[in-house]
Amino acid sequence: MIRNKTTEYALTILGFMASRNEDMYSAEYLHKQLNIPRRYLRRLLTDLSKHGFLKSTSGRNGGFVFAKDLEEINLALVINTLEGYETLCTCILGFSCCIVDKPCIMHDTWMEARSKMFEVLSNTTLADLKEKYQMDLIKKL
Amino acid sequence: MIRNKTTEYALTILGFMASRNEDMYSAEYLHKQLNIPRRYLRRLLTDLSKHGFLKSTSGRNGGFVFAKDLEEINLALVINTLEGYETLCTCILGFSCCIVDKPCIMHDTWMEARSKMFEVLSNTTLADLKEKYQMDLIKKL
DNA sequence: AATAAATACTACAAAAAGGTAGTAATATAT
DNA sequence: ATATATTACTACCTTTTTGTAGTATTTATT
Ligand code: FES
Ligand code: FES
């Protein structure tokens, strides 16, 4: 579940973009807002484009926008796309056979906890984040 | 939550040891049973000893035994010891301020899911694993 | 047409994680 | 005493992840 920094960055970026209303986000702008290393961020952004989350336009005034509706992007999807499906379903005791073969001693307990986690992740779309952010703003008034 | 292989290995080892009744486990034996790379396993075992989970005796017929009661070792403790407390409580959106500073949009939702996870991990001790394993055996008869 | 502000591509560098090798130390068995 | 089976220590190698650099390409502005 979020095994590396890259995935974390991706969620940071997408979450941030979702909760704002700019119509275009340049790498430079995101870098300044989010403090993710410039060059790494750029690469990640084109990666996210290749994976179909974002759409890029190059040239002056270019940048990134979402390629899909915010409702269509949930957090589990992002994680899975970036680090592979397995990370969300590996055996807690480190055996390779989770699900497929004989389940380990912890399997049932672990599966239950994990699927709650997964539920949260897959039920939270970027649209939800935007909504929550809006509510946050209202509360702060 | 289990960010690296080493932690996974540790859980594999401790879980395995807990569910058996040998009075001593040599690195070589564990290697053969669990297929964890020999040398790496050795190092991890002495690490686990240094962290107070195991007790080692060297020399012929030496090996590793638990240094504490099985009831005293829960899975969250193992994870925390090996990869630091933070991994169980970092911000889902990748902001550094989880808990301490201003919580992010996802904070409440995420905290809830995560604490369920944590509950499972910290409520499962090695003694429980042993018990479950025993039950497994009975069921299989 | 020239400039400037952006992304895209490719290759490399640095750091962290995972894994290996050699040798020393320890203790039991013979 | 010696041989054997074990852990301990230290240094190194490999792979993966993270981060950087250089150059090319695209496009709006002037
Ligand atoms: S087999 Fe271990 S958690 Fe599924
Ligand atoms: S601040 Fe983001 S989950 Fe706590």
Image (cartoon, coloured by chain):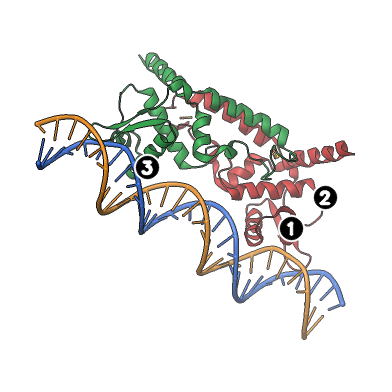
Chain colours: A red, B green, C orange, D blue
Mark-to-mark CA distance, 2 and 3: 52 Å
Q: In the shown orientation, is residue A130 left or right of residue D11?
A: right
Count of numbered circles in the view: 3
Q: Report if the CB atoms under discs 1 and 3 are less than 8 Å apart.
A: no
Quarter of the picture holding the C terminus of chain B: top left
Which quadrant would residue A129 be assigned to in this image?
A: top right
Can you see residue A104? yes
Instruction: Please name the residue that numbered disc 1 is placed on.
Output: A32
What residue would you read off at disc 2? A21
Query: Dot 1 falls on which chain?
Result: A
Quadrant assignment, res A49: bottom right
Could you say whether the residue bearing mark 2 is in a helix, strand or loop?
A: loop
Residue A64 on image: x %, y %: 73, 57
Where, by quadrant of the figure, is residue A123 drawn?
top right
Kind of residue sitting beneath label 1: Lys
Above or below residue B42? Residue C22 is below
Q: Nearer the viewer, residue D5 or A120?
A: D5
